[in-house]
Image (cartoon, rainbow, N blue to C red):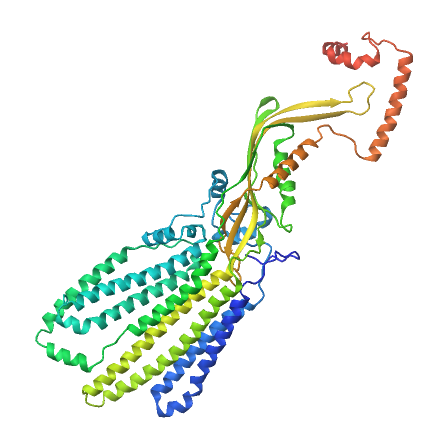
């Protein structure tokens, strides 16, 4: 949407300054951390090429990641360009003056004129749709007001609540599998190696779910309600029962003769334990839930899901052409209610259909659907400290994840050097134990880094939604007028001595108007950049406005009452000239009254005009003679 500058601003300021500042600081810290390994490349590369190249790669990665984060933060601190055409219209805007903007915002429209008309007529809100999927219905049943939030916040809540449920289900499945293994139902060998394997499987499952959660939260630009099913829960529980039993039977068949050797090997070589990573993952999830869910609950407490409208219906008999009713309502009545003189959004343009019949009779019908310029409502559902806390934690996790990534790269370099060394020596039990221990440490750091990255992403996407939500208030009005009309003539000044005459065609209309209005609350999620306020706008509430509707009706009736059906002379020069002619007519009329004479028709001149109108056949005879 083009930047339409106007001296009268809409009062919309940059909502992302705090978020941008924290991102900039975090990006600069990571950039500084990326410079440290780069400064060590020259001295390290001579003695240890693996470590030297590791410093080079890690330094560039951290420097790039930090520069990108700082760049995004600085971009959010730049001037926020807001023209006079924002926010996005509810439906396609048919106003003549807004053709270019209407084409630009066409891809971001949430409704059409039929839906808006249906919402007003049916007293309903099509924004609030039912959840999709078993898990989504469960979450909406526990939190009933969730259905009255915009799609982005509903997706955020579903994702976080669904992750918490997946953690619980995963722990239950792990408990079932552990019980089967510990009781010996999975076999003897499974008791030796199953628990570390099961804990690793649980960790991988939860990390995949954690990644899906962060990705779902980050899909706020899709502007659709995500489906959240529960089919995998039953499969997971079934797998927790069947996998240990089937796997145990298989292990018993394969290692039946080498049980002693396998037992000795497990005692000598430490197997990877995922419990520390699981604890870190659970702590991260709890922290994210602890800072995000209170904001969502606070937002749910402020929902206003009314679907109320004000309505006016009447039947009027007025001397007015039907077209003038629509013209007056659009160009005067609603134009007076513009916000900061911004053109109204016309979703259904008035196009009166006149069905003209014979003898000056006919019928008419027309519709008009219009919205005034939305005005920003300074009603922040979230406190600034709470939003700042979410953003701060996301950037802290980003910086910590960068440090963990640096540590991971060093572990990879050490492990690579160890494998090079191992390839030149003979393998024994001690060396094997060292290799396994080093690899276990590498896995721990890798999983920790993945956990923190996804936690930072989830908080970053969530905080951006909280900072970007904006609320607006506007008038939405629907008018439907039907009726019939009849044309008739009114003539004045028809005396034979009158020098001025007025002949007017008067249209007598029987009008049945139906007006429905509502003060709507709408929400949009702003972003940074050229499309900062071009995302879909959601109708969150419809409120009665009887006083405003009463004012509109009074203005329409006042216009009808003050209409003039007979043409008059308002120019002073014309009035002066008419007065002079009138004086001459008065003198001639006075002279004729002193000496009234009958003409060839047998009547005086005073009576001639009326006599001829009453006896038109005499005019024909006089004409023939």
Residue for point 51% across, 73% down: 24
Q: Is residue 187 left or right of residue 558?
A: left
Residue 25 located left or right of residue 167: right
> In this view of the protein, which residue sits in the foreground, 94 or 336?
336
**Quarter containing the C terminus:** top right
Query: Is 305 situated left or right of 166 in this image?
Result: right
- Residue projecting furthest to the left: 257
Res. 355 in view: no
Q: Is residue 209 above or below residue 133?
A: below
Question: In the rendering, at what x and y percent does residue 33 appear?
Answer: 45, 81
Q: Residue at x 11, y 72 (%)?
A: 254
The residue shown at (87%, 22%) is: 585
Q: Quadrant of residue 36?
A: bottom left
Residue 41 seen by the camera: yes
Quick one: 364 or 237, which is closer to the camera? 237
Q: Return the residue nearer the eye: 507 or 165.
A: 165
- Going 17% across and 68% down the picture, which residue do you hit? 181
């Amino acid at each position: 949407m083009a930047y339409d500058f106007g001296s009268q601003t809409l009062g919309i300021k940059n909502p992302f300054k705090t978020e941008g500042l924290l991102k900039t600081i975090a990006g600069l810290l990571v950039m500084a951390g990326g410079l440290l390994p780069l400064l060590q490349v020259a001295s390290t590369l001579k003695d240890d090429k693996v470590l030297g190249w590791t410093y080079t790669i890690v330094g560039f990665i951290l420097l790039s990641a930090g520069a990108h984060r700082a760049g995004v933060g600085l971009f959010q601190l730049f001037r926020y360009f807001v023209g006079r055409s924002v926010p996005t219209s509810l439906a396609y805007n048919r106003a003549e003056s807004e053709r270019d903007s209407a084409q630009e915002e066409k891809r971001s429209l949430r409704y059409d004129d039929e839906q808006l008309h249906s919402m007003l007529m049916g007293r309903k809100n099509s924004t609030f749709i039912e959840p999709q999927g078993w898990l989504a219905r469960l979450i909406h049943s526990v939190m009933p007001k969730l259905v009255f939030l915009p799609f982005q916040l509903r997706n955020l809540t579903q994702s976080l609540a669904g992750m918490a449920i997946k953690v619980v289900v995963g722990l239950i499945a792990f408990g079932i599998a552990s019980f089967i293994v510990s009781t010996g139902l999975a076999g003897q060998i499974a008791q030796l190696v199953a628990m570390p394997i099961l804990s690793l499987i649980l960790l991988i499952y939860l990390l995949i779910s954690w990644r899906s959660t962060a990705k779902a939260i980050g899909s706020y630009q899709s502007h659709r309600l995500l489906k959240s099913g529960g089919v995998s829960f039953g499969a997971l529980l079934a797998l927790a029962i069947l996998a240990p039993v089937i796997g145990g039977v298989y292990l018993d068949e394969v290692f039946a003769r080498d049980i002693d050797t396998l037992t000795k090997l497990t005692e000598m070589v430490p197997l990877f334990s995922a419990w520390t990573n699981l604890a870190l993952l659970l702590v991260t999830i709890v922290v994210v839930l602890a800072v995000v869910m209170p904001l969502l609950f606070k937002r749910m407490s402020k929902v206003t899901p009314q679907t109320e409208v004000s309505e006016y219906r009447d039947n009027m008999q007025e001397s007015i052409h039907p077209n003038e009713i629509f013209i007056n309502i659009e160009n005067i009545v609603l134009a007076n209610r513009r916000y900061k003189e911004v053109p109204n959004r016309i979703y259904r343009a008035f196009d009166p259909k006149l069905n003209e019949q014979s003898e000056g009779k006919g019928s008419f019908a027309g519709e008009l659907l219009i919205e005034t310029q939305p005005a920003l409502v300074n009603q922040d559902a979230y406190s600034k400290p709470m939003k700042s806390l979410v953003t701060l934690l996301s950037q802290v996790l980003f910086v910590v994840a960068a440090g963990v990534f640096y540590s991971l790269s060093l572990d990879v370099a050490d492990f690579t050097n160890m494998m090079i060394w191992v390839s030149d020596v003979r393998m024994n039990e001690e060396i094997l134990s060292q290799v396994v221990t080093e690899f276990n440490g590498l896995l721990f750091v890798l999983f920790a880094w993945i956990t923190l990255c996804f936690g930072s992403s989830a908080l970053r996407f969530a905080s951006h939604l909280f900072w970007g939500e904006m609320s607006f208030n506007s008038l939405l009005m629907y008018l439907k007028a039907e009726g019939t009309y009849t044309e008739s003539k009114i003539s004045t000044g028809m005396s034979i001595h009158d020098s001025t005459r007025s002949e007017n065609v008067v249209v007598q209309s029987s009008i049945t108007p139906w007006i429905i209005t509502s003060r709507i609350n709408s929400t949009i999620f702003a972003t940074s950049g050229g499309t900062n306020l071009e995302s879909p706008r959601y109708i969150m509430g419809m409120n009665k406005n009887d006083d405003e509707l009463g004012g509109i009706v009074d203005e329409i009736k006042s216009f009808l009452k003050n209409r003039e059906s007979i043409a008059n002379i308002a120019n002073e020069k014309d009035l002066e000239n008419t007065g002079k002619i009138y004086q001459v007519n008065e003198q001639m009329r006075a002279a004729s009254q002193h000496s009234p004479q009958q003409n060839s028709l047998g009547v005086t001149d005073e009576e001639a005009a009326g006599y001829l109108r009453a006896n038109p056949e005499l005019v024909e005879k006089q004409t023939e003679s």
